[in-house]
Amino acid sequence: MDLLTPDIGLVVWMTISFFVLLFILAKFAWKPIINGLHEREEAIQKSLDEAKNAREEMAKLTSENEQILREARAERESILKEAREIKDKIVGDAKEAAIEEGNKIIQSARESINAEKVTAINQIKSEMANLSIGIAKKILQKELSSTEEQKKLIETLVNQAKLN
């Protein structure tokens, strides 16, 4: 039972040693421990503030990126629209040029056909005249083979010439 009940001297010395230890701790250890805790608290607060700033910066960068993407999309659409307009203009110009060239070719072909037609008609007229003269010559040679028929034709022609 002696072990369970402390002696009064032991309690006094334990109390004195406790207060001495408390004094030593208060004098030398308490300030560094408190300062360490304050530094730790400030470091944690600083880290939290930096994290908050980083989050805000990320949000700002994200919004800027979205704005840049919107502008890039708008510019892409503008470029595509301009390219479509240029393509349509080039195609339209090419169609107009092709139509104009086609019309020129058609007009040239018509003029060539008309010239060939006139040439063919003149050639046909010349051939017809030559054939008519040849036929008339053969007919006259056959009908005017006798002198009496020749005199008769001359008289007829003279009578007709006087009347005209």
Image (spheres, rainbow, N blue to C red):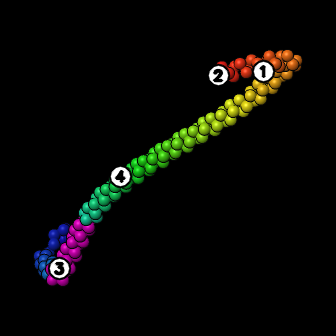
What type is the residue that disc 3 sits on? Answer: Lys
Q: Earlier in the sequence, mark 3 or mark 4?
A: 3
Q: CA distance from mark 3 to mark 4?
A: 63 Å
Image location (x, y in percent) of residue 13: 14, 80
Counting every numbered tag in the picture gives 4
Q: Are marks 1 and 4 in contact (CB under 8 Å)?
A: no
Q: Amino acid at mark 1?
A: Ile
Circle 1 — which element? helix
Q: CA distance from mark 2 to mark 3?
A: 157 Å
Q: Give the vertical position of 66 relative to 141 (above or below).
A: below
Q: Is residue 3 left or right of residue 84?
A: left
Asked if marks 2 and 1 touch (Cβ < 8 Å), the reply is: no
Viewer-side residue, 135 vs 164: 164
The residue under label 3 is 31
Q: Are marks 2 and 4 in contact (CB under 8 Å)?
A: no
Q: Mark 4: which secondary structure?
A: helix
Q: Are dots 3 and 4 in contact, CB under 8 Å?
A: no
What's drawn in magenta, residue-wise? 26-51
Q: Which residue is mark 2?
A: 164
Q: Amino acid at mark 2?
A: Asn
Secondary element under disc 2, as helix, strand or loop, is loop
Q: Nearer the viewer, mark 2 or mark 4?
A: 2
Image-based side of 44 in relation to 69, left or right:
left
Lower position in the chain sequence, tag 2 or tag 1: 1
Q: Residue furthest toward the right?
A: 146
Q: CA distance from mark 2 to mark 4?
A: 95 Å
Q: Is residue 47 visible?
A: yes
